[in-house]
Image (cartoon, rainbow, N blue to C red):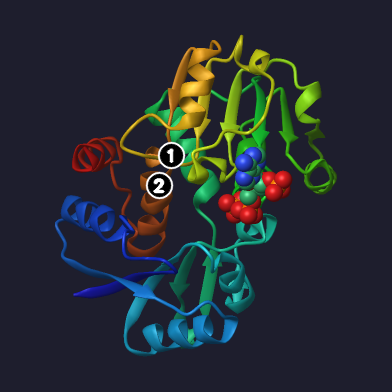
Amino acid sequence: AAQYTVFGNPIAHSKSPQIHTLFAAQQGATIWYERILVENSPQHFQAAVRQFFAQGGLGANVTVPFKQYAFDLADELSQRAQAAGAVNTLILLPENRIRGDNTDGVGLVHDIQHNLTFSLQNKKVLIIGAGGATRGVILPIAEQNPASITVANRTHSKAIELAKQFGIQAAEFADLQQYDIIINATSSGLQGDVPDVPARVFAGCQLAYDMLYAAQPTPFMQFAQQNGAAQTADGLGMLVCQAAYAFELWRDFVPETASVIAQMRENMN
Ligand code: ATR
């Protein structure tokens, strides 16, 4: 069977094998998709990737903390990977060359527009956070022609830097007003925390989207809903949709995602 993998640290709880196995079933195919735990250094990562492809691997996903190393390792890069400065999908090319792509942003956009059915066009979009997760999604969101994109971060200087690079707005938490779609790209939820934005930002919010996901509504989803967000969503859909784009790059087949999201959700409960 065709071999794929996901590299990460930690990696034991990755849902990618299950997701890609469900995609393969839609295609009527059997694939082998494993998890590989790699020691956190560029050298270990590079060696693990080269070994995987030398032994017949066809494609790999890359997760925390290796997306930057994967960017450095790739022999060629997609435009969206270049903009993101990070790679989450590696594709084997002829002559053992490796192409790096980034499907996180298009996965998020697909989840918002097709699964949750919120258009981004002409919407005021706020992204909270200014780390790798934010960098990875700005370009695909901008391609949907929103009215504006504002980035806000606890450490304001990082938001200013991203805003300059991508030609979007930066605002301090305390200065935030109201937005149609608010995306939490901070890792605050990992500590059970929420970003310290004013409650009023959610007053007219149509969709508050947390890139993190959990069996229960995340702290950010609860905070947003309590303060007036009309709808909330967690990042399980983004996870499945970024995987779907990777699967398409590897296998030239577009998986259906809604049923896979539902299946994964059921498995979490
Ligand atoms: P990632 O690749 O997930 O984006 P990262 O680059 O480490 O990870 O960035 C983490 C982001 O979450 C940053 O924007 C960080 O804010 P700072 O730049 O001020 O550190 C944000 N973050 C983490 N914990 C947070 C918290 N408790 N409140 C607000 N923002 C938080």
The answer to whether residue 79 is visible is yes
How far apart are the two marked residues, 2 and 1, measured between alpha carbons?
6 Å
251 w.r.t. 207: above or below: below
The amino acid type found where label 2 is placed reads Leu
Query: How far from the left and from the top, in percent, is residue 233?
Result: 43, 28
The C terminus - image quarter: top left
**Seen in the image, is 211 located left or right of residue 198?**
left
Secondary structure under badge 1? loop
Query: How far from the left and from the top, in percent, is residue 194?
Result: 57, 33
Q: Around disc 1, counting alpha carbons within 10 Å, would you say few (fewer than 14), some (14 to 19), or many (20 or more)?
A: many
Secondary structure under badge 2? helix
Q: Is mark 1 within 8 Å of ligand 1?
A: no
170 w.r.t. 161: above or below: above
Check residue 239 in the rendering and tell me which mark sits there, or answer none. 2
Query: How far from the left and from the top, in percent, is residue 237?
Result: 38, 38
Q: Are marks 2 and 1 in contact (CB under 8 Å)?
A: yes
Q: Residue at x 42, y 34 (%)?
A: 234
Q: Residue at x 61, y 37 (%)?
A: 141
Indicate the quadrant where residue 125 lies. Answer: top right
The amino acid type found where label 1 is placed reads Gly
Q: Is mark 2 within 8 Å of ligand 1?
A: no
**Seen in the image, is 123 located left or right of residue 26?**
right
The answer to whether residue 134 is visible is no
Judging by the rendered image, the residue that carries numbered circle 1 is: 235
Query: How far from the left and from the top, in percent, is residue 4?
Result: 32, 71
The N terminus - image quarter: bottom left
Q: Residue at x 81, y 34 (%)?
A: 170
Image mark count:
2
- Relative to the observer, which residue lies in front, 227 or 117? 227
**Seen in the image, is 230 located left or right of residue 169?**
left
**Seen in the image, is 198 located left or right of residue 133?**
right
